Image: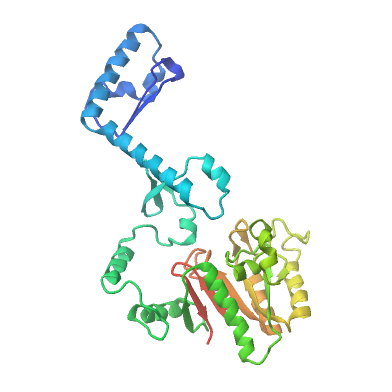
Amino acid sequence: MIVCVPLFGKEGLGEIVLKKLFVKSPLLPLFQRGNLEMLRFNGKKFIFLSVIIAILLEQANREGVITKHMGIRSSINRIEKLDKQYMWHPFTQMKEWTEEKPLIITEGRGSFLKDMSGKWYIDGVSSIWVTVHGHRRQEIDDAIKEQVDKVSHSTLLGQTHPAAAALAEMLIHISPEGLSRVFYSDNGSTAVEIGLKMAFQYWQHKGVKGKTKFLTLNNAYHGDTIGAVSVGGIDLFHDIFSPLLFESLKAPSPYCYRCELGKKHPSCKLACLKKAEALIKKHHKTIAAFIVEPLVQGAAGIITAPSGYLKGIRRLCNKYNLLLITDEVATGLGRTGKMFACDHENVSPDILKFKGNKNKLSKQ
């Protein structure tokens, strides 16, 4: 329990907090915040409270509560000092970071994370879309430990191993129809890079040398490596790196709530899709692939596409001979209610990437 005692009356000045003090005392009900608020400051009651506080502090000291709390505080201060001296955090304004107290996570359980002082939080973003099944899932932990007892890492360059082959079969069986190969990557951004290279290489091997560009959406986010940033559409993240990027074509985002075309859904009849077709029709001879976040543009603010939009994109890619790459980092593996967001509209992409294990699926 937490014992909170205001030493100077109802204003609560000089509040003492004893954390995790478990004592068997009939006086403890007095120290509930509600009871204390009814107390009036006078000499007798102050002396009475001071005596009880002294008793509780002495018991806490005997049980090591105070020493333990001071040790935790010292450890927190040390980690904070090391972090601020040596670390650089992603997507973080470091000047502000150094002026604030950091959240130091030490443990995860299910959908929750615990900080160094013992406080629990809901892991609302699944640690950036990774912990699909929660933290410390027994089956996953046991499988990892079992694998480490055999071998921690074995390259797929010129060789294979049982777990990789067995997992590839499972992934193909749960993926949209037509996908037949698995390429393992180590993170979402490099999975995008691989997909872009595959699409480019496909047309080169087909003898279509002019297909070197990519079509993407406004408000798109596909990662932070140079190729992934090049097909992104959020200037806040990417504008400073523009001199390093290759050119990509951008179609309107299917953002019905704040339509960039000034239309209203459904009376617009998917005007954004028509704009995308006009762009494709003009440049299709130079476009290798259309890369999209199917159904939901996550980093842009959970922008949800209207029904029929994704199926319309697939139709346009077929019509104008473009490959379709779907980025399901934020939507794959059941996050939208089906195994993949593509499944909601029965769409089969040419290349699909997702994150849980970071994988790339493609048609042969």
Residue 194 seen in this snapshot = yes
Colour mapping? rainbow
Q: Kindly identify the residue that appears in the image at 72 percent across and 82 percent down.
A: 286
Picture coordinates of residue 133 (x, y %)? 40, 61
Q: Residue furthest front?
A: 85
Above or below for 149 versus 173: above
Point out the image quarter for the N terminus: top left
Residue 347 position by quadrant: bottom right
Foreground: 12 or 63? 63
Above or below for 254 versus 193: above
Picture coordinates of residue 236 (x, y %)? 66, 56
Q: Is residue 112 left or right of residue 319?
A: left
Residue 76 position by quadrant: top left
Above or below for 71 versus 307: above
Q: How many marks?
A: 0
Q: Is residue 196 left or right of residue 105?
A: right
Q: Is residue 41 left or right of residue 256?
A: left
Picture coordinates of residue 199 (x, y %)? 60, 81
Q: Kindly identify the residue that appears in the image at 46 percent across and 56 percent down.
A: 127
Foreground: 271 or 216? 216
Q: Kindly identify the residue that appears in the image at 33 percent across and 7 percent down.
A: 44
Residue 231 seen in this snapshot = no
Picture coordinates of residue 6 (x, y %)? 39, 20
Above or below for 58 versus 324: above
Foreground: 219 or 276? 219
Q: Residue furthest top?
A: 43
Q: Kindly identify the residue that appears in the image at 56 percent across and 78 percent down.
A: 351
